Image: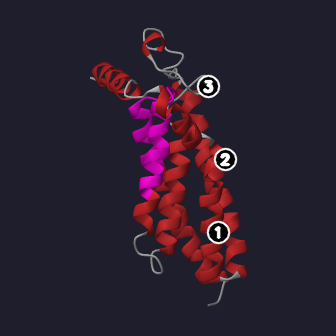
């Protein structure tokens, strides 16, 4: 059963990865570049400051840093535990892959880009939902686009992405609840 699932995963990866073309490669490389999202993060921090004030923002910076650190470290634990080679390193797949990323890490299960972007999307979307009710949808779309970019550039299978997005959503929700508790306990409104 698991072998069949992994085979479907490889087939779907090759299908999605080979949709790409040189015309779009630079755009997807920009999307997948980790520092390309800084304007989004800066905007979110500004919105948090405007709606919650300095004290709350300072506390939330620590919560957000803890969330990203937690997500990133758990992702690394999964990669080191499962040791599933990335498609750009997997025998029988790497020769069929459109590899456009600047480098290829060793293991890929599950995607750190997917988990980090989704945890940020869920956390910020829920936090700011009382003020910007549709922001969460934009954030979720942004996260999915960032996650798909990892398939496009040839470094993650779809299952890596789905698991990363799922873990990120759970983590984002958990840290949102923690943040809500800390706001109620330490920051008076």
Considering only order in the chain, which callout, 2 or 3, is on the residue closer to the N terminus? 2
Q: Nearer the viewer, residue 29 or 159?
A: 29
Identify residue for label 3: 105
Q: Nearer the viewer, mark 1 or mark 3?
A: 1
Q: Which quadrant: the N terminus?
A: top left
Q: Nearer the viewer, mark 2 or mark 1?
A: 2
Q: Which quadrant: the C terminus?
A: bottom right
Image spot of residue 99 (x, y percent): 52, 21
Q: Nearer the viewer, residue 155 or 76?
A: 155
Q: CA–CA distance between discs 2 and 1?
A: 16 Å
Identify residue for label 1: 45
Considering only order in the chain, which callout, 1 or 2, is on the residue closer to the N terminus? 2
**Which span is picked out in magenta?**
140-167
Image spot of residue 166 (x, y percent): 42, 48
Q: Nearer the viewer, mark 3 or mark 2?
A: 2
Image spot of residue 84 (x, y percent): 50, 23
Q: Main secondary structure of the magenta part?
A: helix
Q: Residue at x 46, y 47 (%)?
A: 167
Q: Residue at x 55, y 63 (%)?
A: 175
Considering only order in the chain, which callout, 3 or 1, is on the residue closer to the N terminus? 1
Q: CA–CA distance between discs 1 and 3?
A: 30 Å
Residues packed near mark 3 inside 10 Å, few (<14), some (14 to 19) or many (20 plus) = few
Give the quadrant of residue 75. Answer: top right
Identify residue for label 2: 35
Q: Residue at x 58, y 48 (%)?
A: 71
Extreme-bottom residue of the structure: 189
Extreme-front residue of the structure: 23
Image spot of residue 186 (x, y percent): 67, 82
Give the quadrant of residue 181. Answer: bottom right
Give the quadrant of residue 34. Answer: top right
Q: Residue at x 57, y 36 (%)?
A: 29
Q: Is residue 167 above or below residue 58?
A: above
């Amino acid at each position: 059963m698991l072998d069949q699932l992994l085979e479907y995963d490889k087939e779907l990866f090759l299908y999605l990865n080979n949709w790409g073309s040189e015309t779009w490669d630079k755009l997807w490389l920009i999307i997948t570049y980790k520092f390309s999202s800084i304007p989004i993060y800066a905007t979110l921090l500004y919105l948090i400051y405007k709606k919650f004030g300095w004290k709350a923002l300072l506390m939330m910076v620590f919560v957000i840093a803890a969330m990203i650190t937690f997500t990133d470290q758990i992702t690394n634990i999964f990669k080191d535990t499962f040791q599933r080679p990335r498609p750009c390193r997997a025998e029988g797949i790497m020769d069929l892959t459109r590899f456009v990323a600047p480098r290829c890490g060793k293991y890929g299960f599950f995607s750190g880009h997917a988990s980090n972007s989704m945890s940020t999307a869920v956390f910020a979307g829920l936090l700011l939902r009382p003020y910007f009710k549709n922001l969460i949808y934009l954030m979720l779309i942004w996260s999915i686009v960032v996650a798909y970019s990892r398939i496009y550039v040839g470094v993650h299978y779809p299952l890596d992405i789905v698991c990363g997005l799922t873990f990120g959503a759970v983590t984002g929700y958990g840290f949102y609840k923690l943040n809500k508790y800390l706001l109620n306990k330490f920051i008076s409104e």
